Each structure stands twice: as C-alpha cells, then as structure tokens.
Amino acid sequence: MRSPGNDVDVVRAEIIRNALTSAAVEMSRTLVRSAHNPLLYDVQDFGLGIISSEGLLWGEAPGITTFLGALPDTIKTGLEKHGTDGFADGDVLIVNDPFLTGTHISDVTVYRPVFFDSGLVAFAAASAHWADVGGKTPGGFAPDSTDVYQEGIRLTHQKLVSAGSRNEDLWQLIEANVRFPSIIRGDLEAQVAACRQGAGRVHAVCAKYGPEAVRESMAFTIRRTEEAVRRQIARIPDGEYRASVRLDSDGASDTGPTISVCFTVAGDRIRVSFEGTSPAVPSPINEPAIGARADLRSALKGLLMPLDPANEGHFLPFEFEQPPGLIVSPEPPSPCDSYGYVGVALINLAFLALADGIPDRCPAGGYQMLAVYLYRVDPRKGRPFILIEPIDGGDGGRPHADGPTIVFAGDGNVYNTPVEILENRYPVRCTRYKLLPRVAGAGRHRGGFGVRRDYQVLEPGTYLQVVIENTREPLARGLAGGRDGKPSAVVVRPETPEETTLTDRISSFGPLTPDDVVSVRSGGGGGWGDPFERDPGAVAGEVRDELLTPGEARDVYGVVLGPGNGDPAVDEAGTERLRARRGSRAEAPRR
Amino acid sequence: MSPNDRYRVAADVGGTFIDFALLDEETGELAFEKQLATLSRLAEEFMEGLARLPLALPAIGRLSHGTTVAINVLLEERGGRVGLITTEGFRDVLALGRGGRPEIYNWLYLPPEPIVPRFLRREVPERSAPDGSELVPLDLEALDREVDALVAKGVAAVAVCFLHSYANPAHERAAARRIKERHPDIPVSVSSELVGEWREFERTSTAVLNAYVQPAFSAYLTELGSRLAAAGYGRPLAIMQSNGGVMSVSRAVEQPVRTIASGPAGGVIGAHALARELGLDNVICTDVGGTSFDVALIEHGEILERTETSIRGRPVLAPTIDVVSIGAGGGSIAWVDERGTIKVGPHSAGAHPGPACFGLGGEEPTVTDAHIALGRIDPMNFLGARMKLDVEAAKKVIRSRLGEPTGLSLERAADGMLAIAETNMTYAIRTLTIERGLDPREFVLLSYGGGGGLFAAAMAEELSIGIVLVPRAPASFSALGILRTDYRHDVSLTRVRPLEGGTASDLAADLRDLGELTEPELIRYGFDRSTIELLYRVEVRYAGQEHTVTVPVEPPWLEDPAALAAGIRDRFVESHRRLYGHGSPDATLEVVTARCRGVGRVTPPPWPAWRVERPSEPVAARSVYFRQAGDWVDTPIFDREALGLDQRVAGPAIVEEWTSTIIVPPGWTAVVDGLGDLLLSPNGAA
C-alpha cells in the first residue's frame, strides 16, 4: 500500500489525535459538572465526540459505546439534511429522531459546527440521555409503544441556536413537551456548553497547527489505525462465525423474535450479516440500523484493539449487509424506544460467535440490560420526580479471570448512582445493595455475580417501570464448558403476601404505597471453562466469603472442604477423588 | 526570630533513601545528607542520617518531613489487614464500586480487587437519613460482636463508613469511640473525619485506604517522635501534605491518606521556585526515586492541583498537587510474565534486600542492577563510595531471571528492562501533557531524584523534548523544596444551604469559626498571629446541580453578610459563565462547603551561584553499553563538582556526583548554567 505517511510528522499527528480526544474529554467534564440530572452527572449516560466535516470520528471521550459509534452516522444524517454549506459559525443543532441517531428518542444529540477561517472543519457533538421527552411513558424506554409517535417529541436536526442567536421558540416548544422542564433545560444548557467547549478546543488546535495539518494528521491516523485493525483481523482463521438468541416477546404474541448474526472473515476483512434475524416487531425493541451497526462495530473494535481510544479507522474494516425492515434495521414508524436489548444482545453474540476464532479474547456472555424507573409525574400527588437506575450485573467469565460485576456491555463507562445521592434527591430509600452470588454461571472462571438492590418507596403516587429481557433464553451463555448465568428478576413487596415477581418489561406498575419495597436482582454472567477445573483455593475462599455454600462447592465445583482452623480449607485428596469420578462421565463441553 | 529559628532542616523519606537538607537562614548556606531507608528500621535510620548533619539536633529550629511511606504501601499493595464496618445491607459497596467500565472497549476489563475481602467486611444495624436524622440507632452490641470477630481474624486497622455520615457523623464517632475503648491498639479510620462529602463508595475507599496504610505509617511516626524527643528536639515536626503544605504529626497519624503525594509535593514546590528563578513558564517535573516515578506539571507558572486521586484504580478524596505516580524506580523489580515478555515493577526491592548488586540478599533483578550491568553506574563510587556494588551479582540475576527464560543476551535483557522502564515513565508524562492536548515540546523536563539523570535524556528523546534540566544535588532536590514549603493548614465544613440574606450571616460566622480553628495550628509552629494569612473559599452551585465551583471570599465580607452574599454570587456567576458559557444572575445558589486555608510563609533561601570557573577534563573512562550504538562504548566520566561554568560535555559521556549519575547519550550535549544546573539538549536542537 502506497502511503504518504512519510510526509506526515508522526509526533504532530499523535499530538493532534490526543488533543482532539482530550477536547472530547473536556466536553464530558463540562457536561458532568454543569448538568442537573444525576443520569448525566453521576451515571454518565452520554457520549461525546469530535466528528470531521465529512462525518468521520476524530476523537471521543469514554462514554456509552453505542452513542459513540452512532455519533458519526448521526452527523452524516445532519449533513444530508443541511448540506456542507448549510451550517454557520455559532449554530447549535439538536436531533433525537431514532431513525437519524440510531438509538432511542430519549437520547438527544446536540452538536455545533467548528469553523476556521470560514471553512467548516469539524463538529463537536454531545449525546445525552434525557430525563423525559414526552410520549406515553414517563422517562421514556416505553415497553409497549406500537409506533414512534407514541414515544415523544421528535427533533430532526433543528437549530437551537442559529449563528449565535437562540431560537427561543424551539426551546419553549421542547419545554412544553417534556415532563420535567427545569431539569431538561439545565441539561440542554450543559450539552450546549459542552459543545461550545469542544468547538473552542478544536479551533485552538487548528489555530496552532493549521486546519490542513489537522485534516492531514487525522487522515494519517485513521489510515494507520485501519491498517492495524486489518492486521488483527488477518490473524482470525477465515470462516463464518455465527451466534443467535431469542428474545422473550415481540409484544404482540408469546413468540420472541430471533437475533442472529454472522461474521464472515476473509483475509483482513470482516463482513457482518443478519440471516435468520426476525423482521421488525410491533413493539419498541427494534434497534435502528445506525445503532445496530454501532454496537457491532464497538464489539469488534474491542475484541481487536481494546485499549486504543477510537477513531473512524477502527470501524472501516467492517462491512455490513443490513437489509431494511429487520429488528436490527426497522423503518419508520416502527417503535424503537426499548432498543437497548437488541444492542446488548448483538455485542454478546459477537463474543459467543468469535470465541471459535479468537478464544483468548472473548468473554462468555454477560447479563442482559436491566434498569428500573421509579417516578411520580402528577404534581397533584406530590412533587414530580423520576429516578432512572441502570443496574450492574454479571459480566461473562474471561479466558483468564472471573467475570466482574459491572454495567452491561455497550453501556460503556456508566456508573451506578450512589445511594447517598439517590436518597437526597428522591423520596426513595435504598435498604440493601449487595452481591447476588447464586446467579453467576459456574466455570473454571465463573461469571460475574449479580446484585440485589432494594428500594423502599417513601411517598404515595409512585410508579415503577422495569427494563428487563432474556429471562427465558439466557444471553449470559457459558463458554468452553462454563455454565450459563441466571437471568434478572424484579420482585415487588418481597417476603410479603403480596409478593410479585416481574420478568417482563412493564411500565406504570403501581401506584406503590409508602413502605412498599422493590427488590431488583440482576442476572449473572456466563462461566468460562469447566467448573471442575476451577482452582479449589478460590472455591474455598468464596465459601469463606459467604458467596458459595459448602454444598455448592462440592456439587458444582467438585471441591471437598475439610475442617480448617476457623476458615474453610480444601480437602485435597477428597477433591481429587470427587473430580476424578465426575471426569469419567464428563459431559461434552458446549458453547 | 529566636536564635533557634536560624536553622531549618527538611527530610524527604523515600522508598530507598532518606535525603536531608539543612539551611542556615542567615548565610543561605546549604548542607545535604543521605541515608539508606529500610522499611523495618526507618526511624532509626532517620536519626542516623540526621546525626551526620553538621549541627546538633537541639539547635534546629524547624524540622519538616516529606514521606512516601503511605504512597509506597498503596502502590505496592503491602498494607495491613483491614476490617471494614458498614451500615447493614451495604457490606459490598467497596466491592461493587461504581460499576463502570473505564476501558470502554476492553471486553476483558477487570476492576481493581477490593482491599478488604468480603469476610472482613461486616455490617451493623444503624441508619441515618439524608438530613442526618436517625432512622435506626447504632447497635453497639452488634458492633462489639463484629469488631471482635474482625480482631480475631487478625485485622491491624478498622475503617468505619456509615451511610450519610457527612450529614451527621454521630454514629461513626460513637462506633469509633466504642472500638477504641475495646481495642485500644487498633487504629480506626472514620470516613466522615477524612471526607465531608457524599458518595459512599469514594468515602469508603478513602477510609479503607487510610486504614490500610495506617499501621505502617503511625508505627513509623510514633517511633520517630519519641526518638526525636529523646535526642533533644522539642519543637513540633511538620509533615508534608499532598496539598503542598504541612501538618502536625498527631493529625498525620490519624490521616495518613493526606500524605499520598507528600514526597512528590516537596519536589514540585522546589521545581516551582527554581522555574520562577530561571524564568521558565512550562515545566514537566519528574522525580525518579528508588520505588516510584512521579510527574507533575507547571503550566503558565502555576502548579496544577486536584481534589480526587485514583491509586491503582482506587479513589482517594483529598486536596492534592496533581501528581501521576507509577511504580518505577531504581528498586523496581523486573520479571517475566506468563506470555514470556519482560515487565518492570510495580514491586520494588526497596533498600533491604534492595537490588542484587547491593549484596544485601536481593535475588531479583532491579532497574539499578541493569544500570550496573551495563556500566552506567560506577560500582566503586556509589553514594560517594560509601557503598560498594557487586557487578557480578547484578549480571548473574539478570541472566538467570530474565536472560534464560527469554533467550536474550545479558545486554539485551538489561537494556530491555531499561527501555520498558523508560516507556512506563514516558507514558506517565503523556497522561499529563499530550492527553490534555499540551505539547511536551513546549516544556522543559526538570529531572530530579537520585535516578533522574539516568533516564532524563532517554525520556526527552522519546517525547521530543528539547531541553532537560538536572538541578544541583538532584537527589536532595525534594528536601530542598520542602525547606521552601509554607506552613499550611486546611479546614472545611460541608453544610448544604441556600445563599440568601438569612443564611449569609450563618455562613459568615462559620467562616470566621474556621479561621479561628486554623490560626492556633500555625501559631504552634512558631508563627506570629500577625504574619498568618487566612484564605477563605466557598464551594457554590446552582440549586439542582451536583458539582460546585470554588469561589474565593474576601476577608472584609465576613463582617458584612450582604456583601458576602453579593460577592459570592457575582464571582460564582462570572466563573460559571467563563467555564460553561452560561449562568443565570438571579437563580437560587447553594453553598455546599466552606473552607479556610491558613498559610505561614517561610523565607525562601537564595539560589547560590556556581563558582567553578575553569572547565575540567574527564576523571576516568569506562566501557558503557549504549542502545544507540548497540554495543559497549569507551565513555569519558566527568566529576560534576569540577565542571566549570558554561562548560560543554559532548555525549557519549557520564557525569557523576555524590548521589547521582547523569547520562549524556550519543548525539546529546550538556552545559553548566549559572546556578550549576546541567542543561542537556540533543545536538542540532534550537
């Protein structure tokens, strides 16, 4: 390959690349520090990036990988609408139409063009999850919408600020259509501020090195990155790698739609296709094409070059065959508000499929997306509030280590909400936040534990929404002989006569009354490798830590514990005997 | 100034050496001393080094002490066994952390292991509401039971973190009292005494890390205190804090986590002063010691600070100079990982057993061994020939531990170790500069610490930095910086309240109280009340926001609540607009935290001029392995003390002084400036 790389100052290219990434990181700091919604300042449910004037990713801040992967395509839909010369210095635009952004209507992207010497250089963009966008379900993530019009107000690349002057009508229209206008205004201001910050930094880099040097350096970086990814792909044996999973329900019947993905590796290329994937369904679990591509791009990028901050070059080697009208490519007005299940499934399917080709890099399956919303929207019942809580759970066991308990794949660097913040801001009390060991898939490297997080409702008029999937067919599948992780569940009023277990997505459950408890139990990760090969010392340690019972140690892991000095100790001979006995009738490892 | 105040001594205790600097304030004369540091007999060695200073202990007016005891314990994960007491239902907060995946594309990401394993995390019934009111009383019997169980499991320290203790610390205090009554020998770290802020995981982590370093830290300071008293030193000892000021011993023993950047802070304060003297605006401050490598930045003449630090992925909340610290130094141990590649650090051999070449029983190859094996350090002249190094021992352990498993020759293995250590160090520099969009080529690399000169030019080459500055007595530079440190005492009070006329008078009263708490602390160090400066700040936000903006408060406002409210509002709105581009002038404001920093200024010693006029010839020559040559090169050796003003030394060359060695690689030239600093540049650089 002929490369003009020799003409490029590689040190300058590296500095410019890092300066743009750092611009995005500063944007995220601005958003976090001035936002009004804990979903942004604590949970960090957002994605920020610097995108070139052609819609290529130049730099990003750690955030939600789906948002980051979708940002460049979101900007491209804006460029299609307005044209390259349709932007002015000082414009700020807004978009949340899922068919233009790839995610759901609650994720609102705000972006600002960066001009240097009156030429368009780049865009600074900030996607953030809003507390509400109107529509039938408070806080969004509707479980049961049947078209996109029910999901909230759609914005399609309008100008919030036009050449520096605010379009107040639009701001008022937005405020009139959302349930928590003061929070929304605060967050929107924070997004605008973040974009201003990012644009300023990009402008400064252009002033220092010249816009041409910036473009040239980034073209060089993207090309070099693409070459590096292709070298990684070439190491995967050629062939077709497939995996599929069935979701619980399509919303209209009891049949769940199937998501099926195939990676065809040929030399240094990967083609992604979806044979066997169900058509779009009449419930909001469809994931728009841009988002589905973004999820698979980030899955592949992470398997091939996990630690590199992303730029467009990481995604160029992946080709997509994505015919319209599938659950991974719905057309308007298909509902998309609960798009996240498909995204999390796609990422985990990539691990499960490619484990045959690159077993050292693929974790077992992780738990499916889980979240609860607690809210009150009618001001006559009390001060309106909405608490949105994505819940940590079990990630898949690794080829070399146990799976951790972290946020589900695809949600990037999203944090849990500190109990102390939660209780300060909402009429809710958290009464327990603990590891839930039983749900973890056993293995030589076990899957991550789930968690149990209990909320006590303190005021009347409070309703519950549950975001849950794959409670029938698990996504947290074991690899190399590891066991599957168990699914999530939400139990309302546990250990009372009115105990109700929810395993389907639902909204407006309630009203709950003071002292009602909602107990959220997240699923575990799939195990990696045969449990009978697990280090007996680690098993004894988990018995000591009250994460396993001695019976489980024996039955699941073949570890016999003897009387230690207070703490459980491994009975080496007994363990060897038990493991040898099972070994003679071992089941075949399964995928 | 009483005659006593004429002499000031600073001691910088590192992982391998203790450095002393003695200043005569009247003449400006400096004296330096150096002493090996062994974790098990640190206080004894401190006294041995102190005794070699040309001045008897009772004559010393002020003794200041920078310490890396706490940070080294954290970096090397060698703290004591800690037990944690939490609110019932929340023992796993420490393990769950914040649940994020900071490496967002790393599907094999693993969060750091909790410092306290689950069986040592115990719960007691108690609960406060967010406003601090009691929901469930503290169950003292359960507490006794759980703490007794922890003690039976052999914990050396206990941390206590209850929900909402920032709003009302009563339960935490009662628990701590009870634990101290029952187990007077077990130190207790109380979260609300360390951090007055919400967010239970970060507060728990801070308390746990404090407890983790406490046994080693307090044993050391307690012993040192009694040895100093026995030797006739009666004035208080001042301990360097991470924020660049000092604090008393009694406070430091309770809050060792506030000293995590104590060692680096002294060097940065010194670097700041030297940069000012030389008129340098942008400086990368690097300190290569025995166990750690620390980097800090001076940008536009200001030291960068921050309030939250993460050590190996574990958060600590405390005001600190922004220092990136990694486990890479002369004592860092090299090893071969399961994939067959060489790794360096973070474990360090310290001074005992130390590098294999020390001949004290070290059997693992360290960075110093690699320098010795490649001829870069003179084995006969280490520490002014106070210590003879064993070259054969160094070569043997590199061959057996690294060469044989990897199939590399001695030279390739030793040089590979150094290349990896250099890469680790340059990465730390990059996280501070390039990753913030700052161009390191616009900075001067200031290199100090005993090992700095061995790496400085190589790092600069990697980062395309054109000027490296190695100050005089680089190994004692941090101690020199501590001598220049102002006495500082920070106090704060977290109380969320709206900023209005009524609350402004309460706020003014609180600020005045904070000032009254601050003054006596500084008076104890010998400062006159009239010379103490009090700096007031408040942290303010819009109601509905979480994060705050820090606003300075003028002392006259404390007497006029209306002026206080108006002044804070004006400054906050202005800052918010500057930082975030928007800010309503009349929206409700909340004051979250009130702070007061007391400062007692010291007279900085002058920088003495370099008096050697005539250039000198090499004092020796020896064979040194250079990567650039890929071979052994006959290399001239210069004595730094004999180099003349403006003398140029062309690489390859080695410049030696009492406590450090400076490498001038092929293609580089060194020159002596007016203060005796050595400036290294690549040939052909501007």
Image (cartoon, coloured by chain):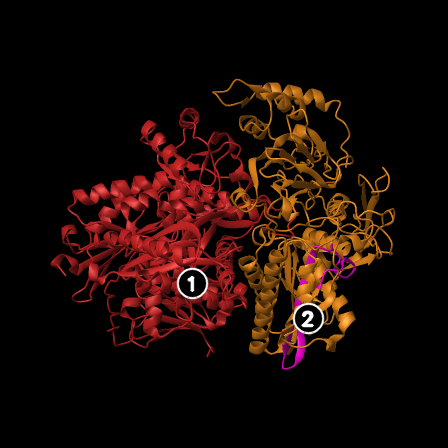
Chain colours: A orange, B red
Q: In the figure, B522 relative to A505: above or below? A: below
* B354 and A306: which is toward the camera: A306
Please check the rendered image and state whether residue A98 is part of the magenta-colored stretch, yes or no.
yes
| Relative side of B444 to A563, left or right | left
Residue A151 spot, x, y in % from top left: 76, 53
Question: Which residues, given as a range, are shown in magenta?
Answer: A95-123
User: Which residue is found at the position 87% from the left and 46% from the top?
Assistant: A276
Secondary structure of the residue carrying numbered label 2: helix
Residue B387 spot, x, y in % from top left: 30, 51
Q: Quadrant of residue A77?
A: bottom right
Q: Which residue type carries mark 2?
A: Ala
Given the current orientation, which residue lies at the most extreme left position? B3
Residue B584 spot, x, y in % from top left: 52, 65
Secondary structure of the residue carrying numbered label 1: loop
Residue A349 spot, x, y in % from top left: 76, 45
Please check the rendered image and state whether residue A326 is part of the magenta-colored stretch, yes or no.
no
Q: Chain of mark 2?
A: A
The C terminus of chain A - image quarter? top right
User: Which residue is found at the position 63% from the left and 44% from the top?
Assistant: A381
| Relative side of B410 to A260, left or right | left
In the rendering, which numbered label is found on residue A219? Answer: 2
